Image: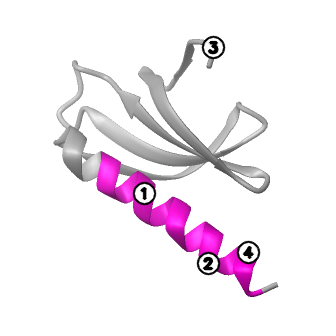
């Protein structure tokens, strides 16, 4: 994965499910230094959830990816 920065957050983890990418961003200068976004085309970030802890961000990332997989299985 290439180095990406969005809104001051460095994207450092991602999971692709179908056409959607789920990412974790980190900004050590922020009060809430981690964010989980959904992303399209590596530049359209939306539905951000900002959290204080890396573990919480990882859980959010995995939950979103699991939900996306479950939605795909229904079709």
Residue 13: which numbered mark, if any? none
Question: Taking 19 as reference, is 12 left or right?
Answer: left
Q: Quadrant of residue 8?
A: top left
Dot 2: few (<14), some (14–19), or many (≥20) neighbours within 10 Å? few
* Pointer 2 or 1: first along the chain: 1
Question: Taking 26 as reference, is 6 left or right?
Answer: right
Residue occupied by mark 3 = 2
* Pointer 4 or 1: first along the chain: 1
- Distance, label 4 to label 1, CA atoms, is 15 Å
Q: Secondary structure at mark 1?
A: helix
* Pointer 3 or 2: first along the chain: 3
Question: Taking 56 as reference, is 43 left or right?
Answer: right
Dot 1: few (<14), some (14–19), or many (≥20) neighbours within 10 Å? some
Dots 2, 4 in contact, CB < 8 A: yes
Residue 72: which numbered mark, if any? 4
- Distance, label 2 to label 4, CA atoms, is 5 Å
Dot 3: few (<14), some (14–19), or many (≥20) neighbours within 10 Å? few
Tell me the quarter of the image containing the C terminus: bottom right
Q: Residue 6: x percent and y percent? A: 53, 25
Dots 3, 2 in contact, CB < 8 A: no
Residue occupied by mark 1 = 62
- Distance, label 2 to label 1, CA atoms, is 12 Å
The structure residue drawn at horizontal position 63% and vertical position 13%, both measured from the top left corner, is 2
The structure residue drawn at horizontal position 54% and vertical position 37%, both measured from the top left corner, is 14
Q: Secondary structure at mark 2?
A: helix
Instruction: Say above or below: 75 vs 67.
Output: below
Residue interval drawn in magenta: 58-74
Residue 70: which numbered mark, if any? 2
Q: Main secondary structure of the magenta part?
A: helix
- Distance, label 3 to label 1, CA atoms, is 21 Å
């Amino acid at each position: 994965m290439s180095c990406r920065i969005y809104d001051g957050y460095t994207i450092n983890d991602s999971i692709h499910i179908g056409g959607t990418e789920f990412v974790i961003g980190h900004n050590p200068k922020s009060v809430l230094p981690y964010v989980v976004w959904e992303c399209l085309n590596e530049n359209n970030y939306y539905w951000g959830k900002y959290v204080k802890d890396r573990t919480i961000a990882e859980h959010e990332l995995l939950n979103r990816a699991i939900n996306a997989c479950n939605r795909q299985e229904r079709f």
